Each structure stands twice: as structure tokens, then as C-alpha cells.
Image (cartoon, rainbow, N blue to C red):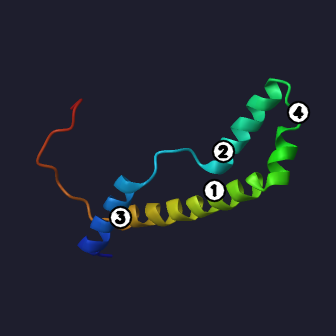
Amino acid sequence: METNKDDLAAFIESLIAAPNYINPAIDIASQSMAAESQGDLEFLERAVRTGAVERAIAEGAREGKACAIALGSLGRAIPQTSKTVPVGF
């Protein structure tokens, strides 16, 4: 299967433009564990009441689907030779 070069270029540009942050579902889970370890046993209740948990789960699911699509695109990409030697080789 051949990959369109425009599609590949757009994919690479989207990777470069992607935000540099943790998946929101993982972030809220780590915040919850940190709050619990500091004795704040109601953090998760507050997060559920404010809708933060639902938003984090929805955003995490969207990111998961986007990652699956991106991995599929990488699997179809045509290997290219490099004109440079990577550091460490």
C-alpha cells in the first residue's frame, strides 16, 4: 500500500504541532493519587462534581483514537533512506 506524500507531510506537521502534555485522564488520576497521599480524600469527589473527570475521560478517549490513527499511518509509511547518520551510530 502506497502512502500519499501529502498525507505523510500533513501527518508529520501534526506531530510537530501536537501539544506537549500528558493525557488528561492520566493527569487527573495522578492528581487524585497525589491529593490522596496528602490526605485530601475528597479530591476525586470534587473532580466528579465539577465534571473534570468526564472531560478528562472524553479527551483521553479522543487522544487514544488519534494515536491509533497515527500509528496506522506510520505502519503504512514507505521507508526512506537517510542521508545522515543518527547520533550514536
Real-space Cα separation, disc 3 to disc 2, in angstroms: 25 Å
Q: Residues within 10 Å of mark 1 (few under 14, many from 20)?
A: some
Against 28, residue 17 (above or below) is below
CB-based contact (under 8 Å), mark 4 and mark 3: no
Residue 9 position in % (x across, y down): 27, 66
Question: Looking at the image, which residue is at 88% across and 33% down?
Answer: 41
Residue at the extreme top of the image, as rendered: 38
Q: Mark 1 — residue?
A: 60
Residue 26 numbered tag: 2
Badge 4: residue crowd in 10 Å (few <14, some 14–19, many ≥20): few
The disc labelled 2 sits on which kind of residue? Ile
Residue topped by disc 4: 41
Q: State the SS at label 4.
A: loop
Number of on-image labels: 4
Q: How far apart are marks 1 and 2 (CA)?
A: 8 Å
Dots 2 and 4: beta carbons under 8 Å?
no
Alpha carbon separation for disc pair 4 and 1: 24 Å
- Image side of residue 65 versus residue 43, left or right: left
